[in-house]
Amino acid sequence: MHAQDPFLAKLGDARLAAKKLANATTTQKDAALEAIAAAIEQGVDEIVAANAQDLERGRESGLGEGLLDRLKLDEARLRGLAGAVREVVALPDPVGQVVRGSTLANGIAISQVRVPFGVIGAIYEARPNVTVDIAALALKSGNGAVLRGGTAAERTNAVLVALIQRAVGSAGLDGEAIQTVDEFGREGASRLMRARGYVDVLIPRGSAGLISTVVQESTVPVIETGSGIVHVFVDASADEETAVEIVKNSKTHRPSVCNAAETLLVHRDAADRLLPRLASELVGEGVLLSGDEAARALAGEISAAGEETWSTEHLALEMGVRVVDSLDEALEHIERYSTRHTEAIVTRDYANAERFLAEVDSAAVMVNASTRFTDGGEFGFGAEVGISTQKLHARGPMGLQELTSTKWLVRGSGQIR
Amino acid sequence: MHAQDPFLAKLGDARLAAKKLANATTTQKDAALEAIAAAIEQGVDEIVAANAQDLERGRESGLGEGLLDRLKLDEARLRGLAGAVREVVALPDPVGQVVRGSTLANGIAISQVRVPFGVIGAIYEARPNVTVDIAALALKSGNGAVLRGGTAAERTNAVLVALIQRAVGSAGLDGEAIQTVDEFGREGASRLMRARGYVDVLIPRGSAGLISTVVQESTVPVIETGSGIVHVFVDASADEETAVEIVKNSKTHRPSVCNAAETLLVHRDAADRLLPRLASELVGEGVLLSGDEAARALAGEISAAGEETWSTEHLALEMGVRVVDSLDEALEHIERYSTRHTEAIVTRDYANAERFLAEVDSAAVMVNASTRFTDGGEFGFGAEVGISTQKLHARGPMGLQELTSTKWLVRGSGQIR
């Protein structure tokens, strides 16, 4: 079908194959995943050769070192990728799980069970490992996947998708369930956003600009994975060691990821006691601090903050520091600047802890824990699909369960109304 | 804020009030609902007078009798509406329900709890009772609501919203949580669809055209409530009485609603035995039948079907009838024409029942039961928000639970990564 339009033909193929995949058993899907892992290991030379072409093209077109590093696949990374696929084998299959059910007064038995979405679309940038990750998670959850991985990784993705299709086929399932639309360029991304009826849900992963474009332009339902302007509030009663450890870990453990902290709020009644040490420990870790007047009065290493200090996701060793008069002022600051990803309070006060948990409107709200714990792996969900910062369908770390919809099974014996 | 823009000012008011409402107790919310019910009963004269103006304007502008009837509120209907609000009081409050949780290996306790979305937008047509229904369901689930109920009911809705705001205020909550944007006309509907950041989810209720417009144009996440091209498949082994009762009930019990059947598929091996009686019983109930050649050969009362027979939601006493060679052909027909609302099989064959349940990709899939059971009230969810035909977030009858998001509460004692 749609032979006249190669783009729609690919999406139609994925849809048809996904329909068969929806009723595959866990054993069949796990065999396909194992075949993918083995194919990656056996295909190292082929993948690395294709990747070398992408890298060369990237260098010629002036890609930065950071992007080139994200683009690069070598033997060690490929072995890691095969290992990640095997971890998906070990995860429980969400399809068929019964969410709830009951027997109605008239004797009809209803049960709500998890079913695959159908076809998942993914739009991402530069990182070809995402191609394998998303394909594996889609397969395990019974979904097809249409992938748009960016022009920079086009050769690598083409080899990876061909290899995945063959591996899935060799395990007796329909490899057409996984497709790439990289060869259609930007047009492919735009059309994917409007492929309502072919694609059931679209997941953008990448820069804030990419995600915003998808959210604005897509007519396919989107799960927004998000940027994190993440706050740590050190309350008046905070324990010193706990505050230092959590603030340092939240900011410096891996500054380039979305659950890293960007802003430190310190209660005025704790500022004299804690802010000088917090600042010097952060500076000792190489963090550049920008702060308000009150913070700068207490520690010398803080440059003057501006509005952009509070509204920027730095994803680097930079942090804003502000002294607030009260828990209320901290909550107001968070309400205004948070991207609703993760916020934490460090406190010994029960009422303040509970109020913070109740009133902060973010995907994860924490007491006395590092913001770095907002993570699918840490939460026990296994592989990472992304962290949703929207409120519809999925919020926070997304596991396989979030890649499913549900349907109602209704078993009667002739009942009518 | 936004005093310069009256539209955004209203949305800002709703947002601020909703933030307070999110942490109101069930007792407070139930008191507000009781105040609304009482205010409707006490306000009958005022509401009926405003409604009379809308009705007069409707007659002058040539609204049909069906629309005028949907627009009309009289004392009996208003008492019914007050009763519906009191039914919402009796429903369990979804806010704060713990969905799942665990203690991680490091001692951190995580729990996923239901929280309100924030502000729900609703776009609907002509029926002012929806104003009260949505406001009540939004309040109970801790959400604000911004309502666009259509120009035809503008006076009635204005009186109802003012009355709701006063009633909510009298119960000690912030009545600004409920707002109407009817006075901004079509522009108000368009802006509501683009009010990302002000409105968390948009629910269109009404004609297929309205829903399609909202789905195409909205940048706010939408829950699609849907049209139903609903199928009943009478399998080869179907019991005669069961088939007759279910087909008749599915088609004729209330033909104007989305869970009413539109197409009857009969297995060839049952057609001689069952189709003549099915046709004559349906015709006896006043149903106009259109069918394929095989169906027409077995019953005289069937006119010739065309492509539009299978692809139209009649919402009337009209039905398509087709003879299929096999369960596979029935599944193919359903895959092609279904709007994925509800489908039913009538069978005595266990394997066919299970295959139908597994392979039909609809919000509700039934064995030996009337399609009319796809309904929030019948499923035990209480009041009806609508029936979702999308796969993201909610699928099938939506209860109060579907008007909530979740957040993760993370309670630590100083853990870092």
Image: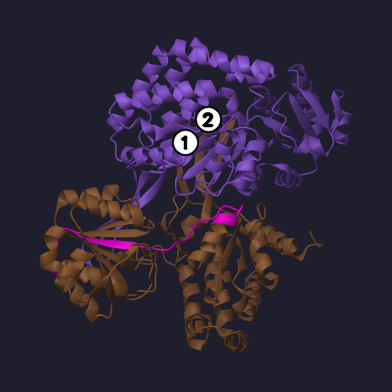
Chain colours: A purple, B brown
Find residue A146 and name its label. 1
Residue B47, visible in the rendered structure: no
Residue closest to the eye, B345 or B386: B345
In this picture, residue A197 sits left or right of residue A269: left
> Which residue is more in the foreground, A292 or B78?
B78
| Residue drawn 15% across the image and 59% down it | B268
A77 horizontally vs A210: left or right: left
Q: Quadrant of the C terminus of chain B?
A: top right
Q: Quadrant of the N terminus of chain B?
A: bottom right
Q: With A29 as the anchor, is A275 left or right in this view?
A: right
User: Is residue B220 covered in magenta?
Assistant: yes
A95 in the magenta segment: no
Question: Residue B402 location, x and y as percent?
Answer: 48, 56
Q: Foreground residue, B231 or B296?
A: B296
Q: Is residue A230 above or below residue B78?
A: above
| Amino acid found under the numbered disc labelled 2 | Glu
- Give how far apart the Cα atoms at labels 1 and 2 are: 12 Å
Q: Which residues are magenta?
A: B216-241
Q: Residue at x 55, y 76 (%)?
A: B126
Q: Which residue is mark 2?
A: A183
